Image: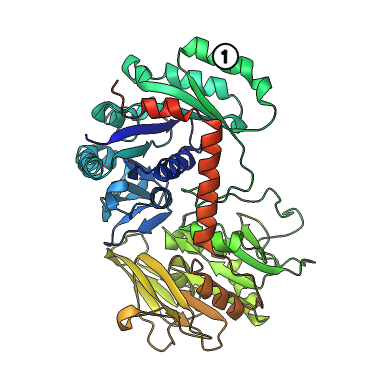
Amino acid sequence: MSARCLMVQGCTSDAGKSTLVAGLCRLYARRGHQIAPFKPQNMALNSAVTEDGGEIGRAQALQAQAAGAPLSVHMNPILLKPNSDTGAQVILQGQAIGHLNAQDYHRYKPRAANAVWDSFQKLSDQYDTLFVEGAGSPAEVNLRQGDIANMGFAEQVDCPVILIADIDKGGVFAHIVGTLACLTPSERKRIQGFIINRFRGDIALLQDGLDWLEKRTRKPMLGVLPYLHDLKLDAEDAIAVADEVADTKTTRPGDIQDSANHRFNVICPLLPHISNHTDMDPLQWHPDIDFQWIKHNEAIPPADLMILPGSKNVAFDLAWLKQQGWENALKRHLRYGGKVIGLCGGLQMLGYKINDPDQLESTQTEINGFGCFQYETILKPRKQLKRHSGHLNFGSKAPISGYEIHQGETDFSGYAPALNWEYGLRDGALSKDNQILATYCHGLFDHPEGQKSLLEWAGLRDAVTFHLDQHRETQLNRLADTLEQHLDIEKIDSILGQKA
């Protein structure tokens, strides 16, 4: 290994590993280092497409942007995309190799490990510093055998580890001490210090606890990070949903609620197997839009725009939508002049039928869609992974860019395309009444000009244009500034590249 290396592991899921790695990537890139992120194994339904047509986790794409490095499949050699409670599609160095249940994947791990070591070596030969992100928690002793995600990886490449814990969850000292207690002596020795994340209040009130922790563990505290309100960056997998919920005691799924809110309202169902929900980030963060995720058994409010998102299990999620009353809500929404956008899996649901002859996503070989379009989709084993640029096929023909990740082939003949890509390629469909737009394009709202044109099509006039890339850059720099202020960077720098 030629590159310096530091691994960030968490006491729990959602402790802040992805965000910390992104911030360290930006901080060290600003100091002139050649930086790359690395996550050996990731389980997430948010993904991105590399320039050469590979698939990696969305968090690693954000970290690569923070590092100023081009996307590479080697930044996330193993990506697991769950499509049920017990199984997932396995992405090996950017390409899908099939669906495996938990037991089958455990037997597949030696081959997966070879891909991890190969990708790590390639990055370490190319960059001078690697920041590695663990998965879940190293305290999951049931997953220790054959581990390539946490301590198993760190032990193999002899990489130092820092442990991050989320104080906002409560019990932060128990999380840290308990995690150490679950590790082997060599693994405990590998941990070089702790970071506490999401602290609110007077730091002086925490000091006694920090002193106790250092004395008990004989390991240094590397810093306490404040709770960063309004830090808006691409989520690895979890969705932040507003605390307010609909009053389901007096309403049923499918009921349309009255609303006194006259802002531009956008709603989107929180599907059980939703994928690439980051497509909605520009709308959630847009100052002129009131965006709402509609959860299980919540009443469906009126809206100006209804979006059906991507799904990793279209058959299951389509049945869930019908059970939740979305079919009637969709018909009523269209009858009153509302606009609808279907993205990827949502595109397939809006069609007449979905055929799954190889039972790739369910045991059903034929599924009836909502019938808003008369096209049919056939699910095929080979996955479509493409990056595109082009323009919208309506209005001002505004420029747009995005990427495809899907296994469906859809015949759109008979409909005007929604998008025109480079090299004469076309995508999606516009309904003849101009109320529904369906597309396979992820990142549909990312391009500011295309976003403005889409929102005008949906009915939002004179909207502020939200520049997603500029927003990400501002947030990444804010994050790096916070790390520089609250972490012992000199100590972290001395840890980088140490051998155990």
Q: Position of residue 486 (x, y in %)?
A: 55, 32
Q: Position of residue 19 (x, y in %)?
A: 48, 42
Left or right of 146 on screen, residue 223: right
Q: Name the residue carrying label 1.
A: 211
Q: Nearer the viewer, residue 277 or 372?
A: 277
Circle 1 sits in a helix, a strand or a loop, which is it?
A: helix
Q: Position of residue 262 (x, y in %)?
A: 76, 70
Query: In this rendering, is residue 148 above or below 299?
Result: above
Q: Is residue 76 among what the camera can see?
A: no
Left or right of 46 on screen, residue 283: right
User: Split into 4 quadrants, where in the image is the C terminus?
Assistant: top left
Q: Amino acid at mark 1?
A: Asp
Residue drawn at the location 54% of the way across and 41% of the way down: 481
Left or right of 33 on screen, residue 481: right
Q: Position of residue 340 (x, y in %)?
A: 57, 75
Q: Nearer the viewer, residue 140 or 425?
A: 425
Quadrant hosting residue 321:
bottom right
How many other residues sit within 10 Å of disc 1, few (<14), some (14-19) or many (≥20)? few
User: Split into 4 quadrants, where in the image is the N terminus?
Assistant: top left
Q: Is residue 496 among what the camera can see?
A: yes
Query: In this rendering, is residue 155 above or below 450?
Result: above
Residue drawn at the location 56% of the way across and 68% of the way down: 307
Total labels: the figure holds 1
Q: Nearer the viewer, residue 469 or 297?
A: 469
Residue drawn at the location 37% of the way across and 63% of the way down: 364
Residue lying farthest front?
32
